[in-house]
Image: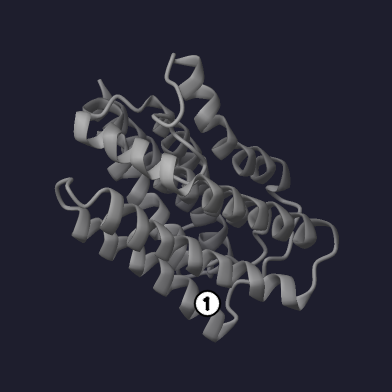
Amino acid sequence: MESFWNSISAYNAETWPWQLAFMAVAVVLTLVLWFRPCTWAKVAMKVYMVAVSLWIALVYYLKYAMNRDYSEVIAIFWCMVAAAWVYDLATHFSSFQKSGKYRGWGIVVLLLPLAYPVISLARGLEFPMITTPMLPSAVALYMLGMLMAFSRKINFFAFIFIVHWAVIAISKIVFFNIPEDILLAAACLPAMFLFFKDTAAADEDASKPSETAVKTVIFIVVVLIGASMLTEYV
């Protein structure tokens, strides 16, 4: 645990200007996409997603967390997240268009990364040994918020990686005393139900189970995953 928090402390102390720059870019691009959506902003947001994923992989894990177990493997994981967004750049799959369906929930999730340092300070921690919006789980939470807020056509590859990361983050809650990561796990569960429900509804035909049956199965799966997460935490 000491090594974990020491790496976070060093990361924050030495990179806080870069973290603020990343956050500022995220705020600007999000506001542009929300109020004045345009092609360049959509492309820029995908480039940002690639850049922030590589930042987590190469800077956070391969530099500051290098002395922690499995840091190389986790860095590869975040490189795969970056690859998912590169694929999106090449195929123009996700549209970053608001559908209106989950806009409110998306706004809430987009704001949750800002709660990370607030929770740390409330727990009595002090800078630089606090969680920030530029830690891996907070970045994943921001990506999830973007997918929720702009849900007309989403990057499912990125979403699957986010869900996987939420499961990984559960173990950190216990082993590294980082309850802030509960936010990601809690946000992923309803997102899983909503996105998979929409996918099932879009693909429905007469030869498949009814939409109600599919929704029920998805709900049960999400509940079981949530129960597994809770069991891991307890």
Instruction: Please tell me whether residue 194 is drawn above or below residue 228 in the rendered image.
Output: below
Residue 34 in the figure: left or right of residue 218: right
Please tell me how crowded label 1 is: few (under 14), some (14-19), or many (20+) other residues with Cα within 10 Å. Answer: many
Give the x, y percent position of residue 205.
53, 70
Q: Nearer the viewer, residue 114 or 184?
A: 114
Q: Position of residue 62 (x, y in %)?
A: 27, 58
Residue 180 lies, in percent from the top left, at 43, 29
Relative to 31, does residue 207 appear above or below in the rendering? below
Q: What residue is rendered at 57% in x and 66% in y?
A: 48
For the N terminus, the image quarter is: top left
Residue type, label 1? Asp
Identify the image quadrant of residue 208: bottom left
Tell me which colouring the rendered structure shows.
Answer: one colour
Look at the image and tell me whether residue 193 can be seen: no
Out of 115 and 225, give the one closest to the viewer.
Answer: 115
At which x and y percent is residue 47?
57, 72
> Please, which residue is most extreme toward the front here?
14
Q: Residue furthest left?
A: 69
Element type where label 1 sits in the image: helix
Residue at horizontal 49%, vertical 38%?
A: 132
- Quick one: quadrant of the C terminus? top left
Q: Residue at x 29, y 40 (%)?
A: 7
Residue denoted by label 1:
88
Q: Residue placed at 16% from the left, 52% from the top?
A: 70
> In the picture shown, does residue 227 fall above or below 24?
above
